[in-house]
Image (tube, rainbow, N blue to C red):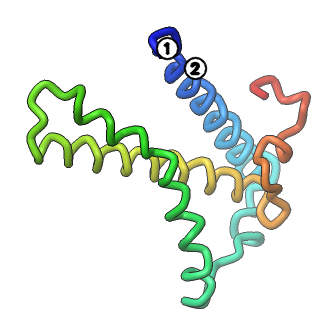
Amino acid sequence: LHALRHTCYVGLTSLMVLIYAVISRSYEANFVVNPGAFREKVNWCGSLEDMVFAFPIIALSFFSIYNVLSVHSALVNPTRSRVKFVLDGTIFLCFVLFFVVGMGGYLYAYDETKDNILLNLPLNYPVV
């Protein structure tokens, strides 16, 4: 596992490139090419039942952060407050990243958003 210690940097860099690609295409599609598209195409959720139906998707997305629990053994002084700070910070950071990519992808393709966000982006887009 020592040989894989730098793979987190590769993953974070690829995530940042993906976020940049999605947000830049979303901005271009909504404010440069068609400035009024945002007001015309956004589908707002109007019922509590639809929001409750989508909640498991959001909750299950946080299962990808299970590795952070082993971080407490690497803390110099693992007090309850420091472990709580690490866990809360990780969950908040994951939420922000998931939210930014999800909203950017939705605002780019609206209801034509595919399961794999990269399928919405053209192959000739330089970032992708």
Comparing 7 with 1, the one in front is: 1
Asked if the residue under mark 2 is in contact with the one under mark 1, i.e. CB atoms within 8 Å, the reply is yes
Q: Is residue 75 above or below residue 40?
A: above
Horizontal and vertical percent position of residue 103: 62, 56
Give the residue drawn at x 49%, y 53%: 63
Comparing 61 with 51, the one in front is: 61
Give the residue drawn at x 23%, y 36%: 72
Q: From the image, tell me which residue sits under label 1.
A: 6
Give the residue drawn at x 30%, y 33%: 71
Q: From the image, tell me which residue sits under label 2.
A: 10
Which amino acid, by three-letter code, is at mark 2?
Answer: Val
Cα–Cα span, label 1 and label 2? 7 Å
Q: Residues within 10 Å of mark 1 (few under 14, many from 20)?
A: few
Horizontal and vertical percent position of residue 98: 54, 50
Q: Which mark is residue 45?
A: none
Horizontal and vertical percent position of residue 119: 85, 44
- Single out the residue that lies furthest toward the top: 3
Q: In this view, does 13 lie above or below 113?
A: above
Comparing 119 with 69, the one in front is: 69
Q: What element carries label 2?
A: helix
Is residue 76 found left or right of 101 in the rendered image?
left
Q: What element carries label 1?
A: loop
Q: Residues within 10 Å of mark 2 (few under 14, many from 20)?
A: few
Is residue 27 found left or right of 119 in the rendered image?
left
Is residue 81 found left or right of 121 in the rendered image?
left
Q: In this view, does 21 lie above or below 32?
A: above
Which amino acid, by three-letter code, is at mark 1?
Answer: His
